[in-house]
Image (spheres, rainbow, N blue to C red):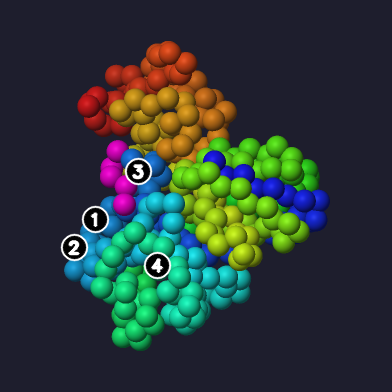
Amino acid sequence: MLRIQFTPEDLTRVRVCQAMDPMWELIGSVQLLQLNAAQRPVGYESWVRRWRVGRKQPAVRNAAGVLAAIAPRSAYFPDFLTPDQPTGGFEDEVDTVLSTPLPRLRSEIGQLDARRPWLSGMAKGDTTVLTRFGDVLRGYYRALVEPDRTAIETAIGTHRADVMQTMMQGGVEAVLDTLFAGGRWRSPWLESAYPVERTVELKGRGLLLVPSFFCFRMPVMLADDSLDPVLVYPIEHAVGEAGSDGIAELIGSTRAAVLSSIADGASTSEVAARVGISLATASHHTTILRQAGLVTSIRRANSVVHSPSSLGYALLGAGPG
């Protein structure tokens, strides 16, 4: 579990990132690729199709492998990969990454479990390795992030507008209470599921909130507590499966995503995690779908497991299993 402690001063210093952060999106997408199909959350189907096409190109496939080694889906990846560039774009962030001071390169890369010759060269500040790494970042971004930039910016912009409206109406604590699915505000603590047990005391430094399209299931913070605190967190968005645009038009994009997420059976909490919505919202949508005859729900122990009905499977265009 992640627990973030706010002082009264911290509550006055909560900021929301003004725009999409390219490197956070790049890293999030790299970690998404490390999930198999059963683990992958709903909402990224069209992007995964882009990856399946892109990986046929050796350069794209190699870039994804390089980035997976330095940004594994685990409890740690180097902080220097996501520099603080509030007014910069992707190229500015790449330049900052490549100019990371040698002691920091050595320290942060040294904490990775992966052992690759190029990682050792990078930790030593080898300029050839760093130049190639820059090419990897640019090639991957052009192939797998840049094509969806408009959709990403739109989703983040919509979320940011909602956050600002909530802040105006209810203050910063109302924002923290509704920021992302699975987050819990219990003053003075913001709590969330996390890969490890971690407590962060802001101590008057405030917190930068970074809504992210490719962040999924749980938020991310910089590993080094001495750096300015940043919380990257998932936003609600739903993109239908291939051929499911008609379903989304018929029942709405979120309900289409919910129906797709239970194709193999899922509890209400699993639906919430897969689709990136709150538990209450997941419960509401499964109830509506059940009332429409598209979902069957069976209680098992302390949870309710949802599956598409015959009509639901027909709408999805596939049979059970």
| Mark before the other along the chain sequence, 3 or 1 | 3
What residue is shown with label 2?
56
Comparing 91 with 295, the one in front is 91
In the picture, the quarter occupied by the N terminus is: top right
Badge 4 marks a residue whose secondary structure is: loop
What residue is shown with label 4?
110
Badge 3 marks a residue whose secondary structure is: loop
Kind of residue indicated by mark 1 = Arg
Comparing 68 with 19, the one in front is 68
- First to last magenta residue range: 34-38
| Helix, strand or loop: magenta stretch | loop
Q: Are marks 4 and 3 in contact (CB under 8 Å)?
A: no
Kind of residue indicated by mark 3 = Arg
Residue 123 picture location, percent across and down: 38, 76
Residue at x 31%, y 61% (from the top left corner): 114
Q: Are marks 4 and 2 in contact (CB under 8 Å)?
A: no
Kind of residue indicated by mark 4 = Gly
| Mark before the other along the chain sequence, 4 or 3 | 3
**Residue 40: image tag:** 3
**Residue 52: image tag:** 1
Q: Is residue 101 above or below residue 179?
A: below
| Mark before the other along the chain sequence, 1 or 4 | 1
| Mark before the other along the chain sequence, 2 or 3 | 3
Measured in 3D between alpha carbons, the distance from the residue under mark 1 to the one under mark 4, in whole angstroms, is 32 Å
